[in-house]
Image: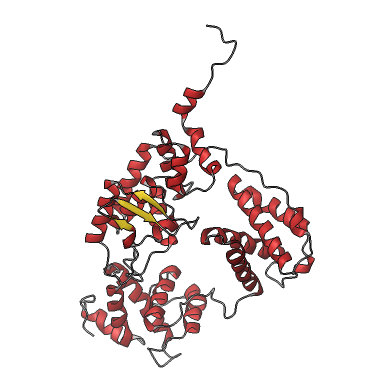
Amino acid sequence: MESPLFLRQWSRRRMEANGLGIILFQYADWLAKQGYSRNTIHQYTQAVEHFGFWREGRSRLPDQVALAETRKFLTTHLPSCHCPTPAVTTYKTCRAALHRLMAMLGGEVSSPKTKEAPSPAGVLIADFDRYLGKMFGLSAATRCYRRRYAREFLAWRFKGGQLDLAKLCFADFVRYVNFRTPSLQRASVGVMITSLRSLTRFLEFEERCPAGLSQAWPTVPSWKQSPPSNVLTWKESRHLLRTVQRTSTSSLRDEAIFRLMIELGLRCSEVAELDLADIDWRAGTLAVRNNKQRRERLLPLPPPIGEAISKYLINERPASSSGRLFVCRRYLVGQPMTPQRVRGPVCRAMQRNGLVRGGPHRLRHTFATRLHERGASLKEVADILGHQDLNTTAIYARVNLVQLRQVALPWPGVLG
């Protein structure tokens, strides 16, 4: 049980005497191979050691950790824990440590929220998602929002009880919209109403609710002509880039992601779906194949972005069998990054700079606005962003004050 991660003799003796002593050192070495820092490995190992100390007398086999045991430890023992140091008692750390332990042992992820069987609402939402995908071909991002508002409405209307969909009436949706609207932005209100109307159409299609319920919905007002107010200034962009470069533990990867979003206007989902084969280094182009509109578009690869990507590939990208450009460096090393993992470093950098509104999509707005200010037509901006409707792109013309001054007519009757 010798390990370079634990140098003190008394620490090794204490771990060897633990109920999980047989696998504690194996667990620490496994974390090291996943790319975790030495400090994190020590915290997680001590959390699992705490679990093993509590587990003594309850189970005999250290390599057969049951999911029910981890739940009981997290929900029953931790709130009233009085174990001596160095027992880790932080719920978040213990849950993460046991999560990794179950992954190493090949078991399920420990979570007190895990349900043995899907609820009726969960089954309904899954059917709704398949309906949106097969019948309308909606993208994963759009379906995610519609599932979210549908799930929230069902939980609000039925309070977690039995789903009696036959009793639904339009007044239920009106009350929910009035209840939910004050906490949403204007654009989100439109997304919520569209999602709920889509839910009623699905329920009618499945004959689970009264007929005609979807016909009562009014037309959702369009606020697309309102200019985006969350465009970053040049100074804010420079500070944000420096924050990514200095504070991130994966600075090269995160800088490449940041540049792709603010200098090419890519969405988080498009960044996550990029493959190594999508980059043509000789031609200096980048192919965006998996996007919201399911139409491939070919973009130029500016030198700063190409340089950032090449530095990441040479110095920071771990060995991986995946063809994706961006892969995980710590947990699930070498596995493709999800859109949520792409959002993470950008959101953290924005929060450090006090940019709490807009999220990563704010970078896309900034890119489009600057591109139009440099003289690109709306059609060119739409082609680069992948917009199908020019009305979606027209909002960026409303913040191009230089062009607006050129087309503005003098007010009649003004005295010289």
48 shown above or below 238: below
Q: Nearer the viewer, residue 28 or 180?
A: 180
**What number of labels is visible?**
0
Percent from the top left, x then y, of residue 151?
A: 63, 64
The spot of residue 37 in percent (x, y) is 28, 67
**Residue most toward the top?**
416
> Which one is nearer the viewer's eye here, 1 or 115?
115
Position of the N terminus, as image quadrant, is bottom left
Q: Residue at x 50, y 24 (%)?
A: 407
Choose top left, top right, bottom left or bottom right for residue 114.
bottom right
Q: Mark yes or no: residue 163 visible.
A: yes
Counting from the top left corner in percent of width and height, residue 340 is at: 44, 61
- Residue under the image location 66 percent in, 59 percent down: 198
Residue toward you, 36 or 167: 167
Relative depth, front residue between 50 and 287: 287
Judged left or right of residue 393, residue 97 is left
The answer to whether any part of residue 185 appears in the image is: no
Res. 314 image quadrant: bottom left
In this rendering, the answer to whether 203 lies above or below 188 is below
Q: Is residue 170 left or right of residue 314?
A: right
